[in-house]
Image: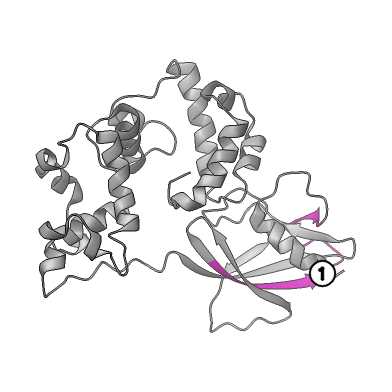
Amino acid sequence: MLQQTQVKTVIPYFLRFVNKIKTLERLSQTNEKQILKYWEGLGYYRRARNLLVTSKILVKEKNSILPKTLIDIKKLPGVGDYTGNALLGLVYNQPRIALDGNVKRIFSRLINKRENKINFENFVKKNKSKLFVSGRNADFVEAIMEFGSLVCKPQDPHCNICTLRNFCKFKKSNKKNKLTSPANFNKKNYNIFCYINKNKQIGLTNKNNLGFLKNFNLPIVKEKKDSIKIKNWNFLCNYKNSISNKTLNIDLYYKFSHKIPKGLNWYSLYDKKEFIPTFNKKIFRRLENLY
């Protein structure tokens, strides 16, 4: 859940999830539909699917034990260097660092060098004797990520309370290297086009892939381009929607149709017994006002 998602966002989902599914064995026996229901609203649903598949592998093939090497743990679905290092540090107290954006920012500021100019894997290897000195590696791998999130923040870092300020070249230098500007990745603008009919149904397809909503039924979604004018569609509203670490700026359009357009299937706006993502439910609520 913590992949690409802040701790404060994850906490209520995590507590609900582990309250429903208390053991690895129970997780491995749960069907995908139920897992997705518990995950609903958190976004990046591929993580939930990977978690389910991983639980089955661990129970059936690994005697319910997580692998202890980075090579082996990365063979599990959805586990790369970042997650693998985090798990090995947290679970087995291995001297590992999960190199997320927060940690990279700390190292970048300590040596006052732009992130895109640093080989972070080499940096960790060269400074291993300085980084892993307490034996509390599980605490350290978590603490350094939180330190970047709460103290060495992207904007307005709390240098006055920072315990590293005496060693920080960024703090001491009059010529501070700017942070590498991230791509405008967290802010996306979309037009969503909805075909609806007099029977209070909406046309949906599972062919759209927005990355964070893959393989789920969606209306027609297109990235917004300011230069293109929308013709022959009725504008309903503009609204903001947050999914995981993405903020979506959405213009919602609709059109009544007697026949279902090619590639779509009718789905009742009111029949929500089958799992649908929160993303769709918000669209449904706005369209319901038309009837």
Q: In the orientation shown, which residue stands out farthest toward the top?
A: 63
Residue 99 shows up from this direction: no
Name which residue type carries label 1: Asn
Instruction: Relative to 84, say whether 23 is above or below.
Output: above
Given residues 81 and 141, the one toward you in this image is: 141
Image coordinates of residue 238 in percent, x first then y, are: 65, 75
Image coordinates of residue 88 in percent, x first then y, are: 31, 32
Q: Which residue is drawn at the image coordinates 66% and 64% (left, top)?
A: 220
Residue 94 shows up from this direction: yes
Asked whether, in this view, residue 9 is left or right of residue 101, the answer is right
Q: In the orientation shown, which residue stands out farthest toward the right?
A: 199
Given residues 197 and 260, the one toward you in this image is: 197
Asked whether, in this view, residue 171 is left or right of residue 147, the answer is left
Asked whether, in this view, residue 30 is left or right of residue 53, the answer is right
Indicate the colouring scheme: one colour
Is 128 part of what is drawn in magenta? Answer: no
- SS at circle 1: loop
Q: Which residue is drawn at the image coordinates 45% and 49% (left, top)?
A: 7
Q: In which quarter of the image is the C terminus?
A: bottom right
- Check disc 1: other Cα within 10 Å, few if <14, some if 14-19, many if 20+: few
Given residues 60 and 163, the one toward you in this image is: 163
Q: In which quarter of the image is residue 165?
A: bottom left
Given residues 115 and 46, the one toward you in this image is: 115
The residue that disc 1 covers is 289
* Span shown in magenta: 248-269
Q: Which residue is drawn at the image coordinates 19% and 46% (left, top)?
A: 121
Image coordinates of residue 157 in percent, x first then y, are: 28, 65
Image coordinates of residue 94 in percent, x first then y, are: 25, 30
Q: Which residue is drawn at the image coordinates 42% and 64% (left, top)?
A: 185
Is 261 part of what is drawn in magenta? Answer: yes
Asked whether, in this view, residue 248 is left or right of residue 85, the answer is right
